[in-house]
Amino acid sequence: MNILIVGGGGREHAIAWRLAQDSCGPTLFCAPGNAGTAALAQNLPISAEDVPELLAWAKEHRPDLTVVGPEVALCLGLTDAFNAAGLRVFGPCLAAARMEGSKLFSKEIMAAAGVPTARSASFDDAAAAVAALDGFALPVVIKADGLAAGKGVIIAQTRAEAADAVRSMLVDAVFGAAGAQVLIEEFLEGEEASILALVDGERAVILPSSQDHKRIFDGDQGPNTGGMGAYSPAPVVTPALLPVIMDTVILPVVRELKRRGIVYKGVLYAGLMIGPRGLNVLEFNARFGDPETEAVLPRIAGDLIPALQACIDGTLRDDLIQVRPGAAATVIMAAGGYPGAYTKGTPIYGLDEAAKVPDSMVFHAGTALKDGQVVTAGGRVLAVTALGADLKTAVGRAYEAVAKIRFEGAQHRTDIASRAFNR
Ligand code: AMP
Ligand code: GLY
């Protein structure tokens, strides 16, 4: 079985690593991949966002399955284009991927489906949006409608800051067309968690819960990043909450989409806020989370490919996913300067030593091979992951592996999973 994995980050390395263990022994291709996927897959020099080139390769090589990591290709209609060519894709079609591609659409679906979420209002006119700010308490959240590479959400502490954010999107068009409409949203208190659900158009299976660490520094300080670490399970998602999430979040969305003629197949990622006001959805994504995937997929036992196939075929069943007991933790090692400007091409040492730490996996996020040497090639460089019988063991092993790895300017958070320990 030949599988094409689209993407080149830690998530895609984790997907490749997990699929490589399936009993069918698949042959993997990764576009574009990184130095980590190169050990498991044939890397293809095609951008994860270049749908025409990906389609041309797939038409020629006819992979049995394509698994899409990042959102951009999904929101450009990769699935629709591949399906039209008779190619099977794990990942939603364009209309369904709008759950991530348009925050307005996602809010509309949530409202129609009765999914709990923060109160919000949408605007395409800056003056009207600024006037509406008076109707919201501080802090207030300003969101660009479309995809903005994780930068389109601003939590404003003052009305002046909120007005600036509105104008930067609607007048200065800092996010281009993605910011042509904005949402003003009430700020919710609480603890965040990520739920990844496999969906087959009708049914869903919830994968182990997880929590991301979005800020660059310990104690959730400093600017937002693509994610500095993750762990699974997230104790804030109690066992009692799982059926509630299924029945009030995941299934209502899938059904409301279906009612509109949109069949959602793939991963539906719900970003949740759990706090004084109960359970609320902050956002949906149309794909596996990064770095959540690096912590979640190692916890799946047995085969994964049959579950992905069942999503495409509309034959998903609970027993297709088996979860290993215990926990997993992922520590991101990032380049110096990230999430601001950083250099690339810095040699990375100690990967072989790190690989010897029991039950650890060093997923590559932004790496490349240069004359046989693994070098940095992105802001988030490595997603150092470990499994353990409990979260403390998993976190300890992950940091043991981190301690073996060196590259100039390397930075990582030292408090991954602390929210779980401080409960
Ligand atoms: P999103 O891309 O919508 O998940 O937003 C990115 C981050 O902004 C989230 O992970 C939260 O940390 C924060 N955020 C978004 N919406 C809200 C909200 N309504 N209240 C509090 N924090 C929020
Ligand atoms: N970890 C957040 C995301 O994947 O969007």
Image: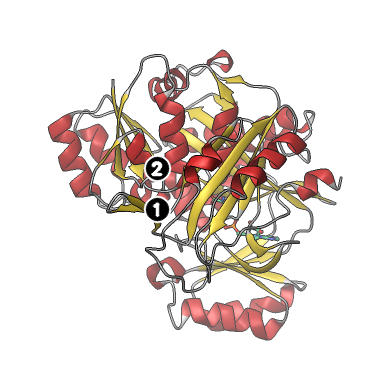
Q: Which residue is mark 1?
A: 367
> In the rendered image, is residue 253 in sight?
yes
Dot 1 beta carbon under 8 Å from ligand 2: no
Which disc, if any, is residue 198? none
Measured along the vertical axis of the image, is residue 9 above or below residue 67?
below
Residue 6 in percent (x, y) is at 33, 42
For image coordinates 74% across by 72% down, the residue present is 139
Q: Describe residue 196's horizontal placement relative to residue 53 as left or right.
A: right
Residue 188 in percent (x, y) is at 75, 59
Q: Which residue is mark 2?
A: 36
For image coordinates 26% across by 33% down, the residue present is 83
Residue 22 in percent (x, y) is at 43, 19
Measured along the vertical axis of the image, is residue 322 above or below residue 173?
above
Callout 1: helix, strand or loop? strand
Q: Are marks 2 and 1 in contact (CB under 8 Å)?
A: yes
Measured along the vertical axis of the image, is residue 36 above or below residue 207?
below
Quarter of the figure with the N terminus: top left
Residue 97 in percent (x, y) is at 43, 45
Residue projecting furthest to the bottom: 160
Q: Quadrant of residue 19?
A: top left
Most foreground residue, 208 or 162: 208
Q: Callout 2: few (<14), some (14-19), or many (20+) C-alpha neighbours within 10 Å?
A: many
Q: Describe residue 421's horizontal placement relative to residue 184 as left or right.
A: right
For badge 1, the amino acid type reads: Thr
